[in-house]
Image: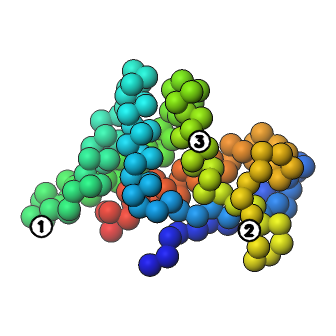
Amino acid sequence: MARKTKTITIEAENRDKNKVFVITEMPARQAEEWAIRVVCALMGSGLDIPQNAMSALQMAAAPKPENPQDRELYESVMASGMVALAKFGITALAKIPFAESKPLMDELLSCVKFQAVPGTVIPLADEGQIEELTTWFRLKKEALMLHVDFLKATTD
């Protein structure tokens, strides 16, 4: 099965209007290691991680329980964990030291490509393709949401 992708067209009235970006999900192992590094950086910074987010991360690696009552609890925790992680997201990464968050953000942005012409994507460059701060932030957020979506899939 192919990795998930998401196409983002900037609609804001700014210098990036109508620019198109394609975000492609990281391979599973890379995404798992990235998530572990994020959690370790967050915990190392002393930031409180919501219990439901931690439970969801722990449960994501475990198989769904067979027992219907346990499965219901599992699905409830996974759903609330998804919401907690989504809320936590980029804001939480901003609270860890820049030296630790920059490589994590750079790796997240490595999933984003610029579509200069329909059907042709190229890696992001630091200058030229993105001219607005808000575009950078949106692309980080969208890339994170594409990767966090795996938690939602575990409850299906």
Name the mark on residue 105: 3
Colour mode?
Answer: rainbow
Measure how far apart labels 3 and 1 are at the Cα level: 37 Å
Q: Is residue 21 visible?
A: no
Category of crowding for the residue at label 1, using alpha-carbon neighbours closer than 10 angstroms: few (below 14), some (14–19), many (at least 20)? few
Relative depth, front residue between 96 and 14: 96
Name the mark on residue 123: none
Disc 3 residue type? Answer: Met
Measure how far apart labels 2 and 3 are at the Cα level: 20 Å
Mark 2 and mark 3 lie on one chain; the one further toward the N terminus is 3
Relative depth, front residue between 71 and 146: 146
Q: Position of residue 110 (x, y in %)?
A: 62, 53
Q: Is residue 44 visible?
A: yes
Tell me if label 3 and label 1 are in contact, CB under 8 Å: no
Q: Position of residue 59 (x, y in %)?
A: 25, 51
Residue at mark 1:
66
Q: Position of residue 151 (x, y in %)?
A: 38, 57
Category of crowding for the residue at label 2, using alpha-carbon neighbours closer than 10 angstroms: few (below 14), some (14–19), many (at least 20)? some
Disc 2 residue type? Answer: Val
Q: Position of residue 73 (x, y in %)?
A: 20, 53
Mark 3 and mark 1 lie on one chain; the one further toward the N terminus is 1
Relative depth, front residue between 33 and 94: 33
Residue at mark 2:
121
Quadrant of the image for the N terminus? bottom left
Quarter of the figure with residue 63: bottom left
Q: Residue at x 44, y 55 (%)?
A: 30
Measure how far apart labels 1 and 2 are at the Cα level: 43 Å
